[in-house]
Image: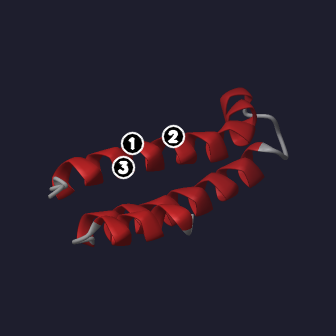
Amino acid sequence: MITINIDKAKTIAHNLRRVARAVEFQPYDDAIAKQIPGQAEGAETARAAIRTKYAAMQTAIDAATTTDQIKAVLENK
């Protein structure tokens, strides 16, 4: 019988979520860092949408009670 530690599975899922979020942030990081006029505002708007998306994923991962639920959250990003 295989036993899965759900807390460790959630930790792994959160790490995967953070990596995916960083990848989505990457195209906007340069505009934010350089405060390029006309681009920084749009980049920050895009980043806010990404933060909202991944905050919802974080909540769903925390609420998951099975690994199948965790997988579903990660697959639907």
Q: Is residue 48 left or right of residue 59?
A: right
> What residue would you read off at disc 3?
14
| Looking at the image, residue 61 lies above or below residue 40 | below
Name the residue nearer the viewer: 11 or 41: 11
> What residue would you read off at disc 2?
19
Neighbours of disc 3 within 10 Å: few (<14), some (14-19), many (20+): some
Q: Distance between the residues labelled 1 and 2?
A: 6 Å
| Disc 1 and disc 3 in contact, CB within 8 angstroms | yes
Q: Which amino acid does label 2 sit on?
A: Val
The circle drawn on residue 15 is 1
Name the secondary structure under disc 3.
helix
Name the residue nearer the viewer: 39 or 49: 49
Q: In this view, does 15 lie to the left or right of 62?
A: right
Task: Tell me which residue sits at (48%, 59%) in the image.
Answer: 54
In the rendered image, residue 30, in percent from the top left (x then y), is placed at: 73, 30
Task: Tell me which residue sits at (16%, 53%) in the image.
Answer: 5
Name the secondary structure under disc 1.
helix
Name the residue nearer the viewer: 48 or 68: 68
